[in-house]
Amino acid sequence: MTKHITWYAAAVLAASIVTPLGMARADGPDPIATRQAAFFLNSGDFAYIRSVVKANGDVKQLETPAKAIAEWAGVIPTMFPKGSEHGGDTKALPAIWSDSAGFQKAAMRLGDAATKLATDAKAGDSAAVAADTKVLGEACGACHKSYRAK
């Protein structure tokens, strides 16, 4: 089931790149619409992870969504090119561009946390996955606190 969700998520993301949800751009996909769609999918993966942990479910199935979050974390900094600070109902704060190094570190922390969760999920270590889920949530929250408007 998880693989089907991940493939569906990839298809939705691909569609958002080909046919942006927001304003059309003559020079390529709308970066705001693309990143918003990807963050939406990322939040779905995280919600799924949290629900399995809360239900004391089989954590092995969490390897794939954790890997998806880790992959997305590596791409996040590239999704905020100059010129995408405004428009498209963006909630991105100016700190993303003024503190690029800090933003990249925050994305790396997210990726590291997701990678650790994927490793522990593959091993079937429920206690470690529960702890990793908390760390992953904290990484998400720290980035939102510094780089996302409420």
Image (cartoon, helix red, strand yellow):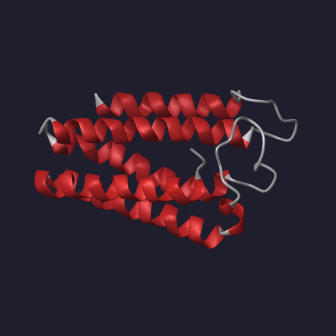
Horizontal and vertical percent position of residue 68: 42, 46
Horizontal arrangement in the rendering, residue 48 relative to residue 145 (left or right): left
Horizontal and vertical percent position of residue 10: 50, 34
Quadrant housing the C terminus: top right
Q: Tell me if residue 106 can be seen.
A: yes
Residue reaching furthest to the front: 150
Residue pictured at 36% horizontal, 57% vertical = 138
Quadrant housing the N terminus: top left
Residue pictured at 73% horizontal, 35% vertical = 88
Residue 76 figure quarter: bottom right
Residue reaching furthest to the right: 26
Residue pictured at 32% horizontal, 44% vertical = 64
Viewer-nearest residue: 125 or 139: 139
Residue 18 figure quarter: top right
Horizontal and vertical percent position of residue 118: 28, 54
Horizontal arrangement in the rendering, residue 108 relative to residue 82 (left or right): left
Above or below residue 99? Residue 41 is above
Horizontal arrangement in the rendering, residue 55 relative to residue 81 (left or right): left
Residue pictured at 13% horizontal, 37% vertical = 57
Query: How many numbered marks, from 0 up?
Result: 0
Above or below residue 59? Residue 8 is above
Viewer-nearest residue: 60 or 102: 102
Q: Tell me if residue 114 can be seen.
A: no
Viewer-nearest residue: 4 or 128: 128
Horizontal and vertical percent position of residue 44: 40, 35
Horizontal arrangement in the rendering, residue 57 relative to residue 20 (left or right): left
Above or below residue 138? Residue 46 is above
